[in-house]
Image (cartoon, grey):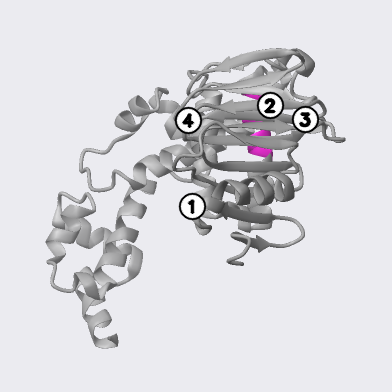
Amino acid sequence: MSASSGIATVGNSDCTVVRFSAADHPPRERFHAWRETYGQTLQRLADIEPLSMRQFHAEATLLRMPRLALMAGRLSASVYHRRRAFVDDVGFSWGLTSSYQAHQFGRTLDIGRGQAIVLTVAQPASFRVPKLGYYINLRVPVHCLSPLIADLDAAYGRPIPAENPALQLLTRYVGILEEAGTFAFPELRRQAVTHIHDLIALAIGATRDGAEIAKSRGARAARLHAIKEDIANSLDQPDLSVATIAARHRINPRWVQRLFESEGTTFTEYVVAQRLARAHRLLADPLYANQKVSTIALDTGFGDLSYFNRAFRRRYGSTPSELRAAARSAN
C-alpha cells in the first residue's frame, strides 16, 4: 500500500479488491484525500461535500469483477454526487446502521436503516449520509437482472423494506463471502455473483419463473451459508439441533434437512464433522496442550466422552490421546 495514496490493491484482471481508508492520512488531509482518491479516482464521482469536518472518518472496500461491483464501508456525514455513467447498470444500496437520503429523477427519497433503494446508474444521483454509518452498494448490469424481473424500470426509486427476507439474506451473504475470501477463487466467485443477482431479484420482486430459479439457486446457497455460519458459532452448545437452527432462521426444520441433503449429507452428520474438526485442531495446537481431552470434548459440544472417542477414531484413524501424543512429539 502506498502511504501517499492510502490505497491497497490486490487481485487480477477478473477480480480487483481495493481498500482505502482516510485514517491513513493526517487529520487535516483526510477529507481531501477521501474526495480526491476515493471519490474521483476510484469511484469517479462528481463530488463529495462534507456535512461536518469534525473527526472526519471514512473507509471502504471495493470489489470489481465481471457482472458485479461492490462497495462496503463506513462513511462520515457527507453528500455524494454521482454523475451519469454511460453503462446500463442497476445500483442497489442500503445502510446497515443509519438512515440516509437518495435523490434521482427530481425526487428525494428517505431510506430508513436497513432499507435498500434501487437506482439506475445511467442517470445522475446523490446520496446524503447524515452521520457515520456502514453502507453497502452493489452495481449489476441490467441484462443480468432483467430476465428475472418483470418490470425493472418500475423498481427504480422504490425503497425495499428492511424486513424483506431476501434483503436480509443478501446482507448476511455478502458479509460471509467477504470474511471467507470467496471472491478470491474464480469458480466460487462466479457462483457467488450469480447468487447475489438472484437475491437482488427476489428482493426487488422476481417473476414467477425468475423466483423459482432464484430460490433454487441464490436463496438456497445464501440460506445454507448463513446456517453453516450459525452452526460454526454454536458448536459448543450440546443441545444444538435442527429444530433450534430452524427456529433461529424462521424456516421449517425439514427445509434445513433438505439443504444439507442437497450436499449429500445430513444436518447431524455435518454438525458432528464440524465438531470433530474443531476438536482435532485444538488437540494438535500446542496452546491447548495442558487442556484435558474431556474438556476439549465438552467445549466442542460432545456431552458423551465415549461417543467422542469412537467418532474421532472413525474419522481420523486414531484416538484423541494418540493424536495429542503425536503432536507433542512432532513439536
Q: Amino acid at mark 2?
A: Ser
Disc nearer the start of the sequence (1/3): 1
**Disc 1 secondary structure class:** helix
- Residue 45 to residue 206: above or below: below
Asked if the stretch drawn in magenta spans residue 285, the answer is no
Q: Which residue is mark 1?
A: 27
Disc nearer the start of the sequence (4/3): 3
- Camera-side residue: 153 or 289? 153
Q: Amino acid at mark 1?
A: Pro
Q: Which mark is residue 159?
A: none
Disc nearer the start of the sequence (4/2): 2
**Disc 3 secondary structure class:** loop
**Disc 2 secondary structure class:** strand
Image quadrant where residue 240 sits: top left
- Residue 158 to residue 297: above or below: above
Q: Which residue is mark 2?
A: 126
- Camera-side residue: 232 or 287? 287
Q: Which residue is mark 3?
A: 121
Q: CA distance from mark 1 to mark 3?
A: 32 Å
Confirm or deny contact between disc 2 and disc 1 (CB under 8 A): no
Confirm or deny contact between disc 4 and disc 1 (CB under 8 A): no
